[in-house]
Structure formats: structure tokens, C-alpha cells
Image (cartoon, grey):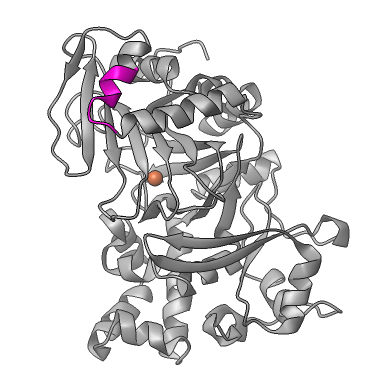
Amino acid sequence: MPSSNRPSRGRRGSKRRNKRSPLFDQLIFAADRQQTAGAQPLVSYDEDDDQEFLQALERYATTRISLKRRGVNHGSWAELDLSASGIDLGGNTTPESLHADWRAARPILFPGAVGPIPSEESQRALALYTQLGAPRGLEEFLSSAGCDKLQPLEFADSRDIARVRVGPLGSPWMKSARLSDWEGDESLRLRVSFGREVDDDAARNAASQAAVADLAERVLPGAARLSQAPALRRQVEDLLGTKALYTQHIAYWNAPGGGALFHHDAFDEATAGGQRGVIFTQLVGQTAWLALSNADLGRRIAEFTEALDEGLNDWVLRELWPERRDFERILAKSRDSGAVAGELSLAGCGCFAGLVNRGPEFTSFLADCGHGLVLREGDALLLPNHSLKNTTMHSVFYASQAGPTYGISCALREDLAQREG
Ligand SMILES: [Fe+2]
């Protein structure tokens, strides 16, 4: 891929130049590069990039990852260790900086916050993946975990495998499901919730939220350790400004080729008493993420579409919007920050769905702007959420060598019942 594929490159001036590759400097020292707090810096690359750039990567790259999701190539990333070179890219983790990130709904990575993961726990998580693939697997698992009064429930989605209520009427339920209909994607998820699906997803029922947390922490490998990780809890509660309840757990087993398209986890609700964020911990394997605030994604979309209008990445334009008038509409919308924010708040990112999930061009562009990160075993990622338009947008990719990964996401809520952490 020629370097002109990345609109960022031709349009950014480097602040300083030295023996490193100019392209490397352009990406790393771009004035608008925005390093995610706690994350190791990374850039996208391609074997056809210029030799100087590839040599700079030889010197600084610690890990390389190729991203492919449901048959779509999203390019390759190189994580960089710049510590010995005295380069400071920001991504600060001072309390002031973290509070600013929290308020702006920017992601915060807490490396190793939940680790190390005991191998017995990893084994249980992987065995559960195998078990849940079978129609009666969920019931058998719950039964062997000591749960009784199990009641199979109806489910509606073609991807669902089983839904089981754990206890009498009104008790929480668990649901096993595939993540996508794509034939090659063996990813699974297991959700713990209560009440009616969708209708009650944002319900402010403190007792039910607490019952969900209790069940998840009792049976899901790693869930209790996430909730109890003391330093992480202190930092999360400092940001939240009150005691936190981790609830509405979803366990994810991302299989090769799996992941999640760009989305957010916000509800249309008042901030006070609502879901204030999502915390995700990686317990087996690795996942790669694009994560940035709604406002930041809007700005990146505007930059990218302006570059398309200037003639860069012309094949992307032809493929996404064969009719010029359709692109003109997108361009006009992307120049209106309020309109972009509204569109991104819709399920699947509205009219920008094709663009934000476009690989490798848009994925590489966001990674080069500092919005990519790799989540390893024991890491926790906080995705703040204040409203539909002030929330963290995110997109997930499988990034292990082989086999399924395992991680847990929780909704972050104010702990109204003040449970013991
Ligand atoms: Fe999400």
C-alpha cells in the first residue's frame, strides 16, 4: 500500500526531523496525534511502506499485529517502545489528566490491573467456551456451578443459543449467543442481566443490578477478581466520584476473525443514576481496539472525508459512495460536528457505518492518530460514558495467535446499595 493511502501522512508536518524516517516522525510527532492514557503507542504499517519507515519500526517495534475481522483486512499495527529515545507522546496518567479524559469520554487503559491470571482460571474460561457452544451447555454449566431453580427462557435472535433464568421469577438470567452470523466467526458471548431484554437494559433497579453482579461474580471466571482489584477500584471510584457497582456482565470469547464493529454502549438516559461507563478486562489472549470519544471520532471522520474530497484514497470513495451526490451529503454532514455526533449516537454509527468500519484505510488512519491499543491478559480498559453523544466509541479485533480469547465487560454504575467491594 503506498503511503499516500493514509490521508494523515501527506497533510501533517513533522515538528522535528532527525535520523528517523520522515514518515515515522510525521506520524509520531503530528500535532494532533492523541495518545490514549496508559496505552503503548502504535502505528499502522504495510510491507509496501518506504524502507526508511520500515527500518524505524525495526528499531522501535515490540509487537506486530495483523488485523482481520470477518473476512475484512484491517491492516497491521506495530506497537512501539519509545522509552529509551526520550520521546514523550502524552497519554498521561496523572490524576488531573485522567479526570480530563473521563469528562471527555476518552478511553483509559490500566495495564495489568487485574492480572496475573491464574492458569486454572484461564482453563476454566476456555472449557466454558466449549461447553456454551452446545444448546444445553449453559444449563449444564450453571447446574455444575451450584445454581438451582434453573428456568429456560425464550430468546428471539437467530444468534442466541440459550437463555436461562437462575432462581425464581424476577431473578437474573444468563444468555449464551454467537457474536455474528458470519460463517467463519466462532466467537461467543455470555450475558448476565434481568427483566425484559432491550426494554429493561437500562433499568435503574438497584436490587436487580446487584443480583446480576452477585451471580456473575459467583460463576464467571475472573469476574470477582475484576470487581475486587483494589487499585483499579480506587481509580475508577475516584473518577466516578462515588462507590462503583460493576454489573450487567458480558463474557466474550473472541475467536480468530471475530470482534465488534464500531459502536457505543450508552443509553438515552439522564447521567445521574445511569450507566456511567463500561469496564472491560482481558483475561485470556489479546484483543486490539480502536477507542475514542464521539467528538474525537467526529473530528477524524471530518479529516478523512476532506482528504477523500481532495482525491486521496480515491478507491475508498468509489467503493463507499459510487454516486457523487451521496458523498456530497456525507461531506456536508461531516463538516457539521453536531450532525456527526448525532449520527454516531445511532446504532451502528448511522450513515458513517461504512466509513468507520472500513479497513484497512480508516482503521490505519485512526491507529496512526493514536486511537489504537492492544489489550493483554490482566489489562483493564475503561470506556467512560456520560450521554449518547459524550461516550466512548469503540471497535474490537481479535489479536491473539490462535484459539479463542476471553474477556469480561461490565457496566459501571453508582453503587446505590453500597455493596462491599
Ligand atoms: Fe461495547
Q: Quadrant of residue 130?
A: top left
Residue 350 in view (yes/no): yes
Question: Where is residue 231 drawn, in percent x and y?
Answer: 65, 26
Q: Is residue 192 magenta?
A: no
Q: Is residue 140 magenta?
A: yes
Left or right? Give the position of 59 relative to 113.
right
Left or right? Give the position of 347 relative to 307.
left
Q: Which residue corresponds to the image point at 44% horizontal and 18% vertical from the top-left?
A: 217
Magenta span of residues: 134-141
Q: Which residue corresponds to the image point at 32% horizontal and 82% vertical from the top-left?
A: 319
Q: Quadrant of residue 201?
A: top left
Above/below status of 174 relative to 189: above
Question: Where is residue 7 drawn, in percent x and y?
Answer: 53, 82
* Majority secondary structure of magenta residues: helix
Comparing 364 with 205, the one in front is: 364
Q: Which residue corresponds to the image point at 27% horizontal and 7% vertical from the top-left?
A: 148
Residue 173 in view (yes/no): no
Comparing 368 with 51, the one in front is: 51
Above/below status of 70 relative to 4: above
Q: Name the image quarter holding the N terminus.
A: bottom right
Above/below status of 355 relative to 174: below
Question: Where is residue 335 drawn, in percent x and y?
Answer: 38, 76
